[in-house]
Amino acid sequence: MTTTQSTPQVQQWVHLAQQLRIDSIRCTTAAGSGHPTSSMSAAELMSVLMSKYLHYDFDNPQNPNNDHLIFSKGHAAPLLYSMYKAAGAISDEELLTLRKLGSRIEGHPTPVLPWVDVATGSLGQGLPIGVGVALVAKYVDKLPYKVFVVLGDSEMAEGSIWEALDHASHYKLDNVIGILDCNRLGQRGETDLGWDTAAYAARAKAFGWTPIVIDGHNLDEIDHAFAHATSANNGQPTLIVAKTIKGKGFSAIENKDGWHGKALPKDMAEQAIQEINPQARSQTYPVQKPENLQPAAEAEKKPLELPKYTVGETQATRKAYGEALRALGAANPDVLVVDAEVSNSTHAEDFGKAYPDRFFEQFIAEQQMVATAVAMSVRHKIPFASTFAAFFSRAYDFIRMSAISRANIRLVGSHAGVSIGEDGPSQMALEDLAMMRAVYDSTVLYPSDANQTAQLVALMAAHPGIVYMRTTREKTPIIYGPDEVFAVGGSKVVRQSDKDEATIVAAGITLHEALKAYDQLKSDGITVRVIDAYSVKPIDEETLFAAAEEAGNKIITVEDHWPEGGLGEAVLEAFTERAGALPTVVKLAVQSMVGSGTPAQLMEEAGISAHHIVQAVRALVRGV
Amino acid sequence: MTTTQSTPQVQQWVHLAQQLRIDSIRCTTAAGSGHPTSSMSAAELMSVLMSKYLHYDFDNPQNPNNDHLIFSKGHAAPLLYSMYKAAGAISDEELLTLRKLGSRIEGHPTPVLPWVDVATGSLGQGLPIGVGVALVAKYVDKLPYKVFVVLGDSEMAEGSIWEALDHASHYKLDNVIGILDCNRLGQRGETDLGWDTAAYAARAKAFGWTPIVIDGHNLDEIDHAFAHATSANNGQPTLIVAKTIKGKGFSAIENKDGWHGKALPKDMAEQAIQEINPQARSQTYPVQKPENLQPAAEAEKKPLELPKYTVGETQATRKAYGEALRALGAANPDVLVVDAEVSNSTHAEDFGKAYPDRFFEQFIAEQQMVATAVAMSVRHKIPFASTFAAFFSRAYDFIRMSAISRANIRLVGSHAGVSIGEDGPSQMALEDLAMMRAVYDSTVLYPSDANQTAQLVALMAAHPGIVYMRTTREKTPIIYGPDEVFAVGGSKVVRQSDKDEATIVAAGITLHEALKAYDQLKSDGITVRVIDAYSVKPIDEETLFAAAEEAGNKIITVEDHWPEGGLGEAVLEAFTERAGALPTVVKLAVQSMVGSGTPAQLMEEAGISAHHIVQAVRALVRGV
């Protein structure tokens, strides 16, 4: 390690780096697994950062002035936890519970720890979220806090990293500082670019960042890089490209392949500690607290006045989404909106035009869009993110991880199903319900009319977790009055009699097919119950159970979605919670890969039109 | 339009560009929807390309020497179809069926047309797939064909594009040529970088490409750019950055916002044709055929000798995957393998070490990995792609689209479920079964032992469509002999008697918990049937129906997955297809967000251990 002067400060940095390395080794060896070598490469970088540049109030993680430190390379968690110990935030005992059942010190960081903003461990996600936090800092909070993101070199191969770099420069986020721990070695060998720090620097520069290439073990170079990065005010984010050595500090494993994600055996750990500095142990290095500034004053909250639609007219639920979102924006200044270049289709533009300061265009970068929403949740805002429902599949890993992050985000996908018509299957979401239902603690809503949509948008704003709403491209009849009340977990019985022979469960566009089928069936002397299951998850079990009991124990579900994982399976799932045999359930769902056509033609071809519902009901209750 | 000389060739280019524009307008106006303006901007680029540089045998789309032309900006389909008409491949009549029910001329290109390699329309996918085709050309086919990819500027914001640029330069693919139609306007306004062609060029250069910035309406510049690009042999791919005008050719809409994805009304279409050139109509411009070369000679096919494992020993199914894949590699030279930097965990390295020429490291870029697999399918190879099962969620949009592309790809995800243990939830796939089931015509396999895994790997190689296998991190007991036979759509009844009181349906790691539960229940006097549902989709309905009938009409499903969309719902789904009394189903699945812990601890905490199965069975059959 080269340092020009051995001042007390430098001595402290050296000592802290030694302690961080030793603690990274100790806790992983105690756990019997984990990533010591990926932690050791960044020890000097973190030593200088936490000693001099980071401002963080560990007693008050919610202090709005705190800097944010995100380990995008989440597998370097042992280093992060060792920093928390060095800062006095956790005890040595707790550090040594790493990876044990019930410990907050998990294999990868999660917000179970109050100082962790978001879960990482799926690579390439920390930087996009960090860029989102920096966006909020600059344009919403208007506070000078910084966002530091520690990156691994392997994860620079993830496209999401480049979405983040692009967005950070577009939004002139000179308050975000990437720290690329370029240790050359990935999990199974050399990375794509190895130690070619010049290549990383050139790429970052081309993406509008200021790259600073340093020796990541040289304290002076690190100090200068952070000094430069934290004083940047030219609108350019900074990427510190630090050439480092994996396993640095313990010569037996330095820069050696085959040591990724492996804890040292006890004897090697002891050897390593001897080589690093057996004296460097359990000293506390307090982190500076931030200035006490106030976030930008918010507009006052006002009563919510949702748009109202007239029963009997038609409107697309996507349009009602935009109008309700605008109303929500008027009422609540915490509402922020992002969209991936399709706001004139999702109708998020209705909000964007009214509140341009709270609308952030994310261009065609769905991963970054979801990351920005997660970042807004980190800063306690109320984010809504919208794109075509099909394109949320681009961000599924981000959505999955946002559940682990305990984020509160609202996702709204338009253009669902074959009923979009002519554009063809690439634009049709036919798996979004399955995808979103299979997210931990998620909520999945699918309104069928404009007033219902408006009400559900208001409910979404207050609902925690990952809340997804599916909207429809086509205009649909307005069947509910503006004062009708809806609930997460609710449903509406829209047709009912005491001689119902079966129940049709539908949602969104298929509800209107179900209503057409109801009329045809009625004229044939068959009376059915029709349920609008607008809350697909949680689903209204009581209403389904009552319908099964009262209407012949026969259910037909119909959905503009593949047969797997959608409304039909949600209905079936409900009955597994109930004692007793299942009802007879006939599922209508999209059975073939359609091409282009009109919405009506494609619903007919897919087998989910009124005509198919009538046939299915007849077969079920009459056997013909 | 500036051209230095009006040679016959130039006159032809001008005329063809006019025809392409007019046909793009005509077919979209006839359809009443579509993207004429996004087609018009690239008319000169495509005119020169198809007249002089493209080599393609339209009569034989399977000619291995054909160049590949991929419209990554799939919404410019009208231009592509107009090129097919100009080349004489489709008639004017067929062109005018654009977006009509039953037409091959869909809203976005799909391989329903024999000249289309892959479906596009979800932006940012054509280039990654094109890069994959170029990889196959250079390293597998060893043929000089070129890959031309037409890109929109909006889609340059997608991270997947930069994964593709990174991989193309890493693999020195000077046979891929990107054509960036930089028309400044996205769907709802200006793109991120607008007409900043220098920024695109700088980024491409930093990613190792040769950028050529041109006026995309200047025929000379286009000609020179293609001449340079198609003769590149320096290992650098070329990106032609063409500054163009959206709607070019019709002054009323040129470079005007608000004209994305809108067909011209009839009167405007007529006006446009008048302005462009009413004479340019329905001329045929034959495309040159390629040289008649043979792909690289393949090794001979040999009989498959799968690895064999001894009943009673233990092995991880992920390890059996690697060993079976290596065996498959020995037998069949068409088998190619890609992995996203984790081949020492997925065990794809077993193949990679044996057949390095057929193993292509994709680094941590799951979207590019799936794209490369799709490209291998385009060239009729047998690709297997592997990563941690959780990280396939990163590529879900690519997987969704690959089904529309009618690709034949095999995806293998390791480290499924809470049973991975200490690494924590970021590494646990708990939604992969739901995600993969909800892919059109997909197959989902989940083996529980090593011999079964090996057999299923062999079946996967021969199975069409999107075939997914989930493997387990932990070693599990080998319960099947090496000669046991398995089938897609099959299952195994592993415990059975004539007094079974209920049926446990499990797969993968939970099958072993079910077997432990069986033993405990038996010693308590309760006999149950145990089914190994290793084929989750299609599921073995007959065996489930028989079990319901013969074993008390009571089923317990147990899976290391969220409750939604996985094995339990697949079992429920089966019963919707059957008439008659339905079973009572109790589903055990992961109910809480676990942290770190040992595999056994986490399966217990999640509610899917033998102990929980025993409790559930007792409650179901004894009411206690």
Image (cartoon, coloured by chain):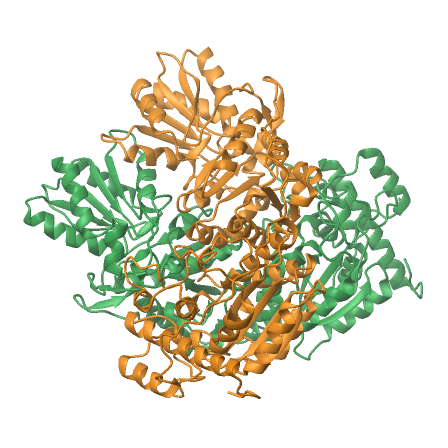
Chain colours: A orange, B green
| Residue name at image x 67 percent, y 75 percent | B236
- The answer to whether residue B186 is left or right of residue A23 is right
In this rendered view, identify the residue nearer to me: B211 or A355. Answer: A355
Above or below for B114 versus A560? below
Residue A357 percent across, percent down from the top left = 68, 45
Q: Is residue A377 left or right of residue B52?
A: left
Between A472 and A87, the one nearer to me in the picture: A87
The spot of residue B20 in percent (x, y) is: 79, 50
- Does residue B59 show up? no
> Which residue occupies the foreground of this view, A538 or B443?
A538
Camera-side residue of A522 and A56: A56
x, y percent for residue A102: 29, 57
Q: Residue furthest right?
A: B5
- Figure label count: 0
Q: What is the quadrant of the C terminus of chain A in the image?
A: top left
Q: Is residue A244 visible?
A: yes
- In the picture, measured across the screen, residue B271 lies left or right of residue B565, that is right
Is B270 placed above or below A251 here?
A: above
Question: Which picture quadrant has residue A327?
Answer: top right
Residue B293 in percent (x, y) is at 62, 73
Residue A103 falls left or right of residue B80: left
- Answer above or below: position of A101 versus B188: below
Residue drawn 75% across and 49% down?
B38
Can you say whether A291 is above or below A242 in the image?
Answer: above
